[in-house]
Amino acid sequence: MPNRVVLIGCGGIGSQLVGPLARYLANRPEPPLLVLVDGDAFEAGNLTRQACAVGDLGTNKAEALARVARSAGLAVQVVAEFVTGANVGHVVCEGDLVLLAVDNHPTRALVDRHVATLSDATLISGGNDETDGNVQLVRRRDGWSVDGHLVEIHPEIGEIDRDGAPGVDGCLAHVVERPQLLATNLMVASAMLSCLWPLLETGSVPYSEVYLDTVRCAMRSRSWFRVPAGAP
């Protein structure tokens, strides 16, 4: 069990993930610290697809979800900021298990590249595009990337932003995507938790990526090229 589980992005996917994640972690023999990271606030438009109450409107998303996690008995740290090049080294540290639930490629690339500099860390990244989505697993073990990295397997994640410079402004640099749907957010959150569970319970996951389709109620997994048989 890592000492810290870091959830970056407490909106569409992250807000749906916090409740079951907190209950699961709080009932582990040695619960980790849950770190919630988001610089955004809940707005009225979020009510249709994110796990927020009317009383949360105008409240920082990480602060609001921290109350949910603490009610489950979990120790929580809040970082009420967007992830940027200036703070990513403080947000994601050696040994962390990172759940990346953001809605833009610049932040995915930023966190992925930082994880690549660490000796031991785990990244579970989830995203969606209206009715379909995916979850990727990136494992660093003793300075080696078991699965490869997001920017290698999905080059579009690492592409330069609209200004022609690498995206380092985190969630402040948005990528235009189709609207999120509640059902897809729930499905991606479930797939992320389903990836985290075997990692913590058995130390192994037999895949590196999951594709999902809400319309067909279907998921399928695949392994990236670097995964050897029986890899932890």
Image: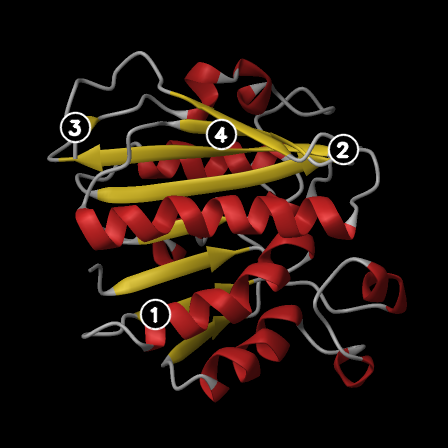
Q: Residues within 10 Å of mark 2 (few under 14, many from 20)?
A: few
Judged by depth in the image, the label closer to the viewer, 1 or 2, is 2
Between disc 4 and disc 2, the foreground one is: 2
Disc 1 is placed on an element classified as: helix
Q: Quadrant of the N terminus?
A: bottom left
Q: CA distance from mark 4 to mark 2?
A: 16 Å
| Amino acid type assigned to the residue bearing label 3 in the image | Ala
Horizontal and vertical percent position of residue 127: 61, 38
The residue where tag 4 is placed is 210
Label 2 element class? loop
Residue at image mark 3: 231
Disc 4 on helix, strand or loop? strand
Q: What's the residue at 44%, 72% (across, down)?
A: 22
Q: CA distance from mark 3 to mark 1?
A: 24 Å
Tell me the number on the disc at residue 25: 1
Task: Please provide percent x and percent y for residue 71.
Answer: 49, 88
Q: Which residue is mark 2?
A: 215
Residues at marks 3 and 4, CA–CA distance in whole angstroms: 17 Å
Name which residue lies at 34% across and 27% down: 207
Question: In x, y percent, where is residue 26?
Answer: 34, 77
- Check contact, mark 3 vs mark 1: CB within 8 A: no
